[in-house]
Structures are given as C-alpha cells and as structure tokens.
Image: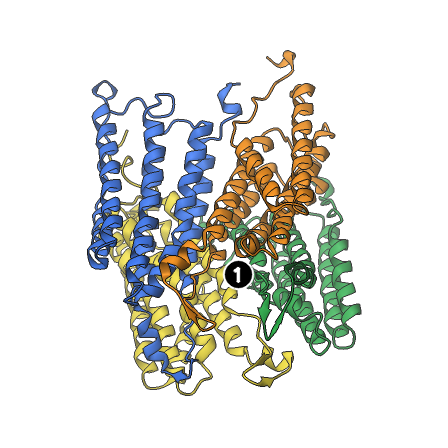
Chain colours: A orange, B blue, C yellow, D green
C-alpha cells in the first residue's frame, strides 16, 4: 500500500467535488435576478418596462455563466495532466473554488448598479476583482502543481508547460488591467472582461508530449 | 494516445456536469415560492387565503419542474447517440444549460403576475420565451452533432436522425407559436405550453439502426 | 443490443439524478431560516431573543432534514430491488422528486406561522400535506414497479413485496390522518408527524428471497 | 449474497451523498451576502462604502468556506478506514450532515451582527455553536464506528485509532471553549475559532497500520 495514497485525495475525488461546486455556482446565478416589484416608492410601472430594465442583470448572468462554464472546462482539461495531489494542492484548489463560488455576488452587484451613474464604477471594479480572483487562484494551483514533478504528468513537453504558465500569467495581467481600468472607465474595463471571455471561447491548445513518448 | 481525447471532454463528463445543473435548477424552483406575508399595506388576511392565492406559483412550479425533468430525460436519451464531443459541441451544450438554468426566473414572474390583468400577458410572453430558449438551444446542439459524422453514432438510420430533427424543429415552431400567441391571448399561449408538455410525457420513439447493424 | 436499453434510462442514472435532488433539497432547507431583523415596526429587540424566537424554524428544519434523509436512504434501499425502468416508472419517479423538492416550502411556512394562534392550524395542514405527498407519490412508484415483473427483482419473496406494500399504505394512512387531524388540532397532527419520523428511524426490514434462490 | 449488503448502504453511496451536501452547503454560503441597498431609512451612501461595510460578511464567508472544505477533506480521509456501514452509522452521518448544512445560518448572523456592539456577543456564541455542532456530531460518528470492529478497517494500529479519538475530543473541547468564551469576549472566542481553522489546515497524520499488515 503506497504511503501517499493514504493521506492524499485522488484527483478523481477532487474533480467530482469541484464539478459539484461549479454546477451549483453556475445555477445559483439565476437566483440573483429577482422578480421585479411593480409598486414601490409611490410609483407604478408596467411589467414589460420592469423586465426590460433588468437588462444589466441578464448581461451579467450570461457573462458570469460563460465564465464559470469556461473554468469548468479548463479545470477538466488541466486536471488530466495531474497525476496525484498533495495537501497544499488540495488547499489551493479549495481556495480556487472559494473564488468561483464568490462570483454570484459581484454578478448581482453589477446587475444592480451598472446603470447607476454614481456607483457603476464601483460595481465594475468589484466585478473585475471577481474575475481576477479565480484567475489568480488558478495560477497558484498551476504554478504549485507544475513545479512539482510528483504531481504533473512528466511526459508533457516542457515547452507546453511553459506555454500554459505564460497564458495564465497573461490572463492575470489582463484581468488586473480590467481591475485598474475600472477605476477610470466602466466601459473600458467591461470591454476587457467581455473580450477575454470571448477569447477563452477559442478551443484550448492541444497538449504536446516529449518526443520519447510518441 | 488519441489526439482528440486530449482536448475534448468525454461525453460522460459533460453528462455528469449537465445532470448536476438539471438537478440544481429543478430543485431551486421551490425557492421562488416565498412564505406569504400576512400583514402588509394596511390589510391583513388569513394564511389559508394567502396560500390559496399562491395557486399560480404552484401551477408554474409543476409546469417548470416537469419541463426540466423531461429535458433531463431527453438529454440522456440523446447523449447515448453521441460518440464524442468537440469544442463547439461543448459550447453549445453550455448555452443549452444556460437556458435551462434561466427557467426559474420566468417561472417566478409567471407565478407572481399571471393573475394581474395588466401584466399577465407580459408574464406569459416571458414564460413562453423561457420555454423557447431551451428548445432552440437544444436544436442547435442536435443540428451541430447530427451533421458531423465524427460526433454521432453512425449506425443510426438516417431516417431516424431526420425524424428527430423534424421533431425538434416542430417543437421550436410550437413554442414560437406560444410566444407569438402570448402577445394576443394569455390563455391560448399557456394552453400551447401545457399541451406541449403533456405531449412530451409520451415515451420517446425507439431508435432505428441501419439494417446492416442488426 | 437490447431493444429496451435503447429507450430506457438505467436505474443507475435515475438514482444519481435522484441523489442530486435529495442532496440539494435537504441543503436548501437552511435558506428558509433567515437572519432575523432586529428593528422593525417601531420596536427593537435583542438578537438573543430574536434567535430564540426562531425555535419553530429550527424544529421544522430538523424534522424536514430527517424526513428527506430517510427518503434518501429508503430510495436506495428499494432501488436495489428494481432491475430496470420504463417510461412510466421514470415519470412517476420525477413526480416523487417534485414532491420531495416541494418540502422546503411547507417547512418554511410551518417555521413562520406555528406560533401564530390564528394561522398555526393552516400551517400544520400544509406541512402534513407536504409529508403526505412524497409518501403518496412513492406508493405510486412502488405499486407500479412491484406489479410489473419486468421491473422488480423476481427473486424477492412475494410475502416481502406484500409487506412493503402494506407498510407504504399504512404510512399514507397515517399521514392522511395527520392531515385530517390538523383541521382539528395542531398538536395531535404534529405529534403524528414526529412519531412517524421517529418510527422511520428504525432499521428497514431485511429482504426475504424465494427459497429456490438460496 | 451477504445478509448485510442487503440492508446497508455502501460507504461509497454515503460518501457520494455527503459530497453533494458538502458541495451545496459550501456554495450556498455566498447567497447570504446580499447586494447592499443604498437608499434606506432617509440616508444614502455610496456603493463603495456599502461594500466595504460588508467586511464581516466576507470574513465569515471565508472562515465558513474553509471550515466546510476541511470537513469535506477529513470526511474522505476518514471514510477510507470504514469498511461498511450499518443503520445507526447512517443516522449519525445524516445528523453530521445536518450540522454542516446548518452552518450558512450562523455565518449569515455573524456577518450581519458582528459589528453591532449590542449583539456581537450573541452572534459569536451562535457561530461558535455552529462550529461545535459538526465537531460533536463527527465525534459521535467516529466513536460509533471505531468501537465496532465490523465497521472499521481492523488493520489500523490501535494507537492510531486512539490518536484520532483524542484529536476529535480535543477539537470538541476547544470549540466548547470558544462557545463559553463567547459569553465573555467576542474577540477571544473568534480567535479560538480562527486559530483552530488554521490548525486544521495542517496536513492530517499518516495512518499507522499493525505491523503484521506490512
């Protein structure tokens, strides 16, 4: 009986738990769109206009849904390169899941305040932070795993590992850019967020294996 | 090691994730039925009458629960004909799940406003749209998969594939009809929605395989 | 390739989906206990007393949690006797899950109104109905499956099948009794509900197989 | 066919169900952080200050997320030592899950009232109780299983079993300490809770097997 198997969770267990969190976080997003009340503060409006005024919530719902969906696909894509886990890897993955689970909150704030001229900048800053956090925590998971031969599939070509590291660092840089841009302009910041999401819709690069493995 | 396996999610993974989203979306529906407050706006009523007045919410709960349940069963029924996945297939499936996850919102709006003469038409329009969206996104998944021999089980008889394509197109037409009818009449639109749901309760057609496969 | 396998969901698939719904419904119960506001309607109270006043919600939480937990265990216990499924079986199981998913609502209503003298009877009636519905829909699942040799494990001794049928019918009778009692007395009705739950905590009867199977 | 297999749930089934509850409870935590309203009770504030004032909610979110994540990891770590289950074991595990699922409520109360001088003590008491309950119910699961040779892996060295028993009892003592301390001082109580959480982040002890097993 291997010494390590006894204190480590298998990657399969972690994937199943992570899948559960992804599926729940992505489905909870709809709860943040509430049925609009029509009578309040002395005014009354039609349901049609109330529903149309919720467009920022629909926009935020779609954007966050796609983001979590992409992270789910990437999580699977990358977990196949991990052979085993250790305690720190598990903790970093829990930290990553904590950031994914947090996303419904900035999504709801963005949906509520993006059309409020006084507060749209703050709402955008929070949302950009909400996207930066999963990117950052994922980078930590990746850096930790890829530096430990024990954890990662050693058949992978080093150039491919470097490519992914650079890609994740670039993502962090761009989300940091969106975060900083939000302090100046709501539009630029959101454009970066939407642009990055569209970029992530492209298919992931095929893995490259060391020649001796072929 | 197959080139494709390395960048594609297995159909099993996608089914497990989709199952999670189905199970969560179907169970979240109940959260949209809130405990009725009895004292508000200067009036007071009994819990009995308050609970009875929630009948539209119960109706919407049952209708949406059955709809999601049917989509779950159909998703399984059809995924067994898919041999593999590719990136675009995955994205279309995420889009389909986004439409399923959206359903609790139109359900809640319908439950709230179906008895409000001024707004019942809008609530019905949104609900018909909420049913049209999963039907439409599912049609996209199906059309994409069935046109690519690489994805679909090639042993299926072309007549069976055509039968399903026609069936999904007809569904879309009928939900579009319910959507358009809602602009004129709440009753007709809801009758189409309920009728289609009852129709879907019929067992699915047995698959037909090419003769050479028998 | 079997004709039936192609249009039927395996019992394993249905169990996995049902498990998801059980796990979600049981965990959603806590959402119905809201953080108590301390300042409202011109009065102010301490958090301690506000939390203590929530005791009916804690009571309802525990009762419903245990009920769903028991149904989950029973669902597994009984699904091992089912060999296969058919379309009507699936629909009945979805109906059963709809009744399980509904339970958070009566639970919340009971927690809110059980201490309100004017409305406690109605709240109890709804709760007893909320417990009767899963018992009734489960009886339908069982009756349908146990009458069709194709679905149930034919090695089971008929006396054992009859025992279970009688047990489920008795449960229905008792919940119906709790429902009717609630029209007269809140206390008697809740006592039946609590008593039945305690009874269900007893271990299930060991299955009996036909002698020829030993 | 084993007599016991027929009335017992496999540990695998229980683990899968427990995983579902863990994943849902951990993801629901975010729902307790609500979008802050800016206009209320005659005052108006900026979104920035409203979001910053929510720091207790973020703190409580992180603490509870890490706690549930640790319990999930420990649950897996320990379930591998269980060979089988029995009815009482199942009931105790459901009781444990009930305590885990309860955690979002004390978390929300702590986030709401930790900065309210009149009520922070009560909020902390409830939170310490919310952490004590899972520790206590887990101790019950462990004591029951470890005293029954039928349930636990008999290859484990008795000294290792005793070590775990002592560790769980110590946890209970410390959470009880945090509970009692909260009656006197909010700070001391929360410090114990945070300190224990940090302690749990350490890797679990490697299991020790009887020498004859090597």
Image quarter in which the N terminus of chain C is found = top left
Q: Residue at x 57, y 85 (%)?
A: C42
Which chain letter goes with mark 1?
D
Does residue C212 lie above or below C117 as drawn?
A: above
**Which quarter of the figure has residue B98?**
top left
Q: Residue at x 27, y 60 (%)?
A: C162
Q: Residue C103 in the image: state x and y as whole percent.
A: 40, 65
Q: Residue at x 69, y 43 (%)?
A: A180
Q: Residue at x 55, y 63 (%)?
A: D98
Q: Is residue B192 visible?
A: yes
Q: Is residue B50 left or right of residue D27?
A: left
Nearest the viewer among A28 and B184 is B184
Disc 1 packing (10 Å; few <14; some 14–19; many ≥20): many
Q: Report helix, strand or loop for mark 1.
A: helix
Q: Residue D146 in the image: state x and y as whole percent.
A: 64, 56
Nearest the viewer among D34 and A152 is D34
Does residue B140 lie above or below D183 as drawn?
A: above
**Which quarter of the figure has residue A145?**
top right
Nearest the viewer among B195 and C18 is B195
Q: Is residue C43 left or right of residue B14?
A: right
Q: Is residue C134 visible?
A: no
Q: Residue D197 in the image: state x and y as whole percent.
A: 73, 57
Residue annotated with mark 1: D94
Q: Residue D115 in the image: state x and y as whole percent.
A: 71, 70
**Which quarter of the figure has residue C185?**
bottom left
């Amino acid at each position: 009986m291997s010494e390590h198997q006894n204190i480590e969770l298998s990657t399969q267990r972690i994937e199943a738990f992570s899948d559960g969190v992804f599926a729940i976080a992505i489905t909870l997003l709809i709860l943040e769109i509430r049925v609009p009340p029509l009578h309040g503060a002395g005014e009354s409006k039609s349901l049609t206009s109330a529903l149309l005024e919720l467009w920022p919530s629909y926009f935020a719902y779609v954007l966050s849904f796609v983001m979590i969906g992409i992270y789910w696909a990437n999580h699977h894509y990358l977990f196949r390169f991990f052979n085993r886990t250790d305690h720190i890897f598990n903790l970093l993955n829990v930290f990553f899941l904590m950031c994914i689970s947090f996303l419904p909150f900035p999504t709801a704030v963005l949906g509520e305040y993006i059309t409020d001229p006084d507060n749209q900048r703050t709402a955008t800053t929070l949302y950009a932070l909400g996207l930066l956090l999963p990117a950052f925590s994922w980078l930590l998971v990746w850096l930790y795993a890829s530096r430990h031969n024990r954890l990662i599939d050693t058949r992978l070509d080093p150039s491919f590992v470097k490519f992914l590291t650079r890609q994740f660092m670039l993502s962090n840089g761009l989300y940091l850019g969106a975060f900083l841009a939000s302090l100046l302009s709501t539009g630029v910041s959101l454009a970066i967020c939407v642009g990055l999401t569209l970029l992530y819709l492209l298919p992931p690069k095929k893995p490259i294996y060391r020649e001796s493995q072929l």
